[in-house]
Amino acid sequence: METILVSACLLGDNVKYDGKNNYDEKVEALKEIYDIVPICPEVFGGLPIPRVPSEIKNGSIINKEGKDVTHQFNDGAHKVINIVNFLHIKKALLMDRSPSCGVTKIYNGRFNGTLIDGMGYTAQLLKEKGVKLYTIDTIDELINDK
Ligand code: SF4
């Protein structure tokens, strides 16, 4: 079976900033047709669970307390890229709106709940690497792309 990456929070892992997850039962169908490697770039980068939420502002990632966590996000993203290289991954299902995993939308960097068009830090690197990105909204394409 082909191996794909999936944001760990979508699989039900409690890795979100608030210690919860974004489980979606639609991921169950994927388990029949793909080998799944769960990733959480923020945890890979050494950030704790729970953690202060972060947003992207002017190319840097700043947490809600004003601390620059770009270094940790960069570390985590590169660990994901290492997995992609090692396993020859071509597809990833990612959690939209996240500053790491967002594919179509992210928050605007002001912590006021406003979404803008944009990609998370890891998602951007994956795209540059040629990995095809999907979200829960496009999961049917990922299933049919098999
Ligand atoms: Fe989920 Fe990605 Fe955020 Fe980890 S970094 S909690 S996998 S959206």
Image: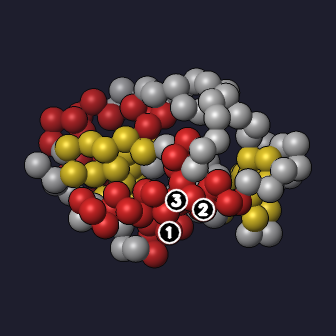
Who's the residue at 39% across and 31% down the image? 11
The answer to which of 57 and 27 lies nearer the viewer is: 57
Is residue 23 visible in the rendered image? The answer is no
Tell me the amino acid under the disc marked 1: Leu
- How much space separates mark 2 and mark 3, taking CA atoms? 5 Å
SS under mark 3: helix
Who's the residue at 22% across and 35% down the image? 31
Tell me the amino acid under the disc marked 3: Ala
SS under mark 1: helix
Q: Quadrant of the C terminus?
A: bottom left
Residue at the disc numbered 1:
125
Which residue in the rendered view is the most extreme toward the left? Answer: 1
Quadrant in the picture for residue 58: bottom right
- How much space separates mark 1 and mark 2, taking CA atoms? 10 Å
Residue at the disc numbered 2:
74
Residue at the disc numbered 3:
77
- How much space separates mark 3 and mark 1, taking CA atoms? 7 Å
**Are the residues at dot 3 and dot 1 in contact (C-beta closer than 8 Å)?**
yes
Quadrant in the picture for residue 18: top right
